[in-house]
Amino acid sequence: MTALRRAARALRASLEPRPGGAAQDAAQAGRGRAAAISVLIEGGQQAELVSMRMREGALVVVCTCGARGCVHAEEALALFEDDARPDSHEERITHVFEPAMRVSEPIPMPAIKVTPEGRNRLSDVLADLLLAVTRSGVSGGISAGVTEALERLAEHASTASATGLRIWVGSLKAALEARDTEGVVRALAACSAIIDALRKLEPPAIADAHVSSWLGGAQTSNVANERATERTYLELAREHRPGLARAGVEQRYLIDLETGELFREDRAASETASLGPCPRLVSIGLAHIEPGHPPRRIRLLQYTTTPLIEASAWQSVARFAQPTFESLLARHKQHMSAAAGLTDMIALVKPASVHMADRAHLVDGAGKALLLTGAEGAAGKLEGFMHATDAQWVLGRVHAQADVLSIVPLAACGLRHGKPAHLQL
């Protein structure tokens, strides 16, 4: 145990603030100062990991057990003292270390062939599906012909990277089951745009954007992924989308705290996603951002995460929230014109209030309304949250039917007694 205690004291010294303030600390961190220390405590049924880091001159301690001031944290802190406590259980501590940057597993190359011939085969299968839906009609629901076409499509879309295609299939099936004529028309318009892109009937830039949105980035086009380094993102929400397979696709929405751009991280059933709960702060060492329609898809390759989110990060997000809804309809029309229904428009808005009359609405300061749709009970939860907090923003997917705007709320943030509170819907 003496060796562990010596290692702990050495790491403690690397964490302690130096004269010169935060700026000098940051500079020293770049020259090898520890950003955090973790202690693994074993015992009972499972091991717990206690993480310690300096924030604004104070030591912040978090344990994986989730409790504040837990016995694991006490045992970890005791190890860093110069003299051993008589009542400590140091034999339970097995590792003291500085956490390394998490590196996710490389994404396997997709099974879809990227040659013109391969693209044309996929376009032929999509054309068969489009024809099957047109023949059976909306009133026919998911007919035998549509089912057969979907089964053939599944054989050509087995790659986990084709999350956009998988979500489109889920949307098409939902619209057919609901006999939703407008939903089916939008889905078929997107299908036609992809067929033209795969057959290179669209201009190259538009074709690449269409294909990337459905099938992934550089693997399906000549456009390279954008490399992102030394960025900080805040994950705002997660949702599960129905897809081609029963497992569907999980989508995670992140915002760049400097630019306000929204990104999505997709995870199909057979694909590994980044680690950490939601919400979380993600410090990027390296990430790839795929070309395509917004929100662009991001792949986190080297990163660290923390669930400890400072008030300044929430304030940064609130700066990008749109306080009025006036321009949303024009933005949605522009999005639909460019993306042809291939991706959803994600918006970050700051409502003034929520009305739960005949139909639930968000209302901005000018009285412009935004219809609330989505999962049952979500509007009620959002109303209760907004009445209990000073609303800062609502994140959601925006849709429009006959120039009537609606939003599927995914998450919200408000101030409760001056402190940020997050709601996942």
Image: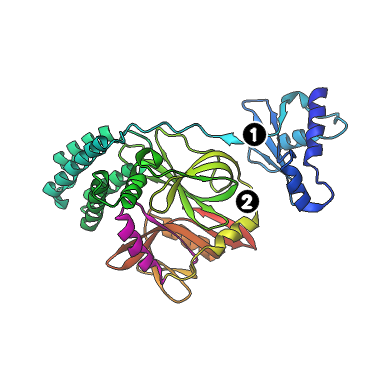
Residue at the spot of label 1: 100
Residue farthest to the bottom?
366
Q: Position of residue 221 (x, y in %)?
A: 35, 42
Residue at the spot of label 2: 309
Secondary structure under tag 1 reads loop
Vertical position of residue 387 compared to residue 276: above or below: below
Secondary structure under tag 2 reads loop
Q: CA distance from mark 1 to mark 2?
A: 20 Å
Which of the image's four quarters has the N terminus? top right
154 left or right of 86 in image: left
Give the residue type at disc 1.
Ala
Residue 406 showing in the rendered view: yes
Foreground pick, 159 / 338: 338
Q: Position of residue 401 (x, y in %)?
A: 28, 64
Q: Which mark is residue 184?
A: none
Which sits earlier in the primary sequence, circle 1 or circle 2? 1
Is 117 included in the stretch rendered in magenta?
no
Crowd rating for badge 2 (residues with CA inside 10 Å; few <14, some 14–19, many 20+): some
Range covered by the magenta-colored residues:
326-350
The residue lying at 23 percent from left, 46 percent from top is 195
Q: Position of residue 419 (x, y in %)?
A: 64, 59
Give the residue type at disc 2.
Ile
